[in-house]
Structures are given as C-alpha cells and as structure tokens.
C-alpha cells in the first residue's frame, strides 16, 4: 500500500471512529495520518483518485465533527441551565437559619 492509499484508509477509519464517538482513538489516528502525510511530499499523478476520495471522506469527517461539537455545546448549556435551577430550588427549599447537618436551628 502506498502512502496515499494508507492515509485514505486511515481517514476512512477515522470517519468510523467519529461516527461511534471514539474520540481518543480518533485523535491518535488523525495524528498518525498527519505524520504520514508530512512524509509523502508532492503527490504523483497516480495518487489523484486516492486524493479525490480522501477529499470526500475528509468533508464527511468534518461534518460529523461539527455535529458532535454542536451536540456537546448544547449538552453543556443544558447542564449549566440545570445547575442554576437546582441551586435555586435548593435555596428555596432550605428553611431559614436551620442547620441541616445536626438539625439544629
């Protein structure tokens, strides 16, 4: 397998890792792909099909990452909202001047 085909195979594997939410493995694979790509130099004419396929896979991978990023931001925003609501509820439910640890006023 030549280097161009190898980075295409890694990109395909990364697409699967991203779809499955396997972020640490994705990061390691991406680092390996970048390392290999840096050693290749200019592509020969025979690498055109692999590069075109790589472009498609990279666009799909980027879209998957963008969706995961948006989902994570939404989830974090929800946690912040819930935390504020819980704090407000707890403050409203606590009797004034009462010590919850040993139930003394």
Image: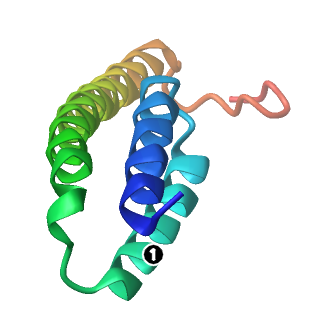
Residue 23 on image: x %, y % = 52, 44
Residue 52's quadrant in the figure?
A: top left
Residue with the mark numbered 1: 36
Towards the viewer: 103 or 65: 65
Towards the viewer: 82 or 56: 56
Give the secondary structure at mark 1: helix
66 lies above or below 46: above
Q: Residue at x 34, y 23 (%)?
A: 88
Residue 46 on image: x %, y % = 22, 59
Q: How many numbered marks appear?
A: 1
17 lies above or below 48: above
Towards the viewer: 72 or 47: 47
Q: Residue at x 27, y 37 (%)?
A: 61
Residue 80's quadrant in the figure?
A: top left
Coloring scheme of the render?
A: rainbow
Towards the viewer: 30 or 47: 47
**Can you name the residue that lies furthest to the right here?**
102
Q: 10 Å neighbourhood of mark 1: few (<14), some, or many (≥20)? A: some
């Amino acid at each position: 397998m030549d280097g161009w085909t190898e980075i295409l195979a890694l990109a395909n594997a990364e697409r699967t890792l991203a779809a499955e939410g396997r972020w640490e493995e994705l990061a390691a694979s991406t680092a390996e792909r970048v390392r290999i790509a840096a050693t290749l130099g200019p592509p020969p004419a025979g690498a055109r099909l692999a590069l075109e396929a790589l472009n498609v896979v990279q666009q799909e991978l980027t879209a998957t990452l963008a969706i995961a990023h948006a989902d994570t931001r939404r989830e974090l925003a929800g946690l912040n909202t819930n935390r504020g609501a819980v704090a407000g509820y707890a403050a409203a439910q606590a009797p004034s001047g009462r010590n919850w640890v040993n139930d003394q006023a």
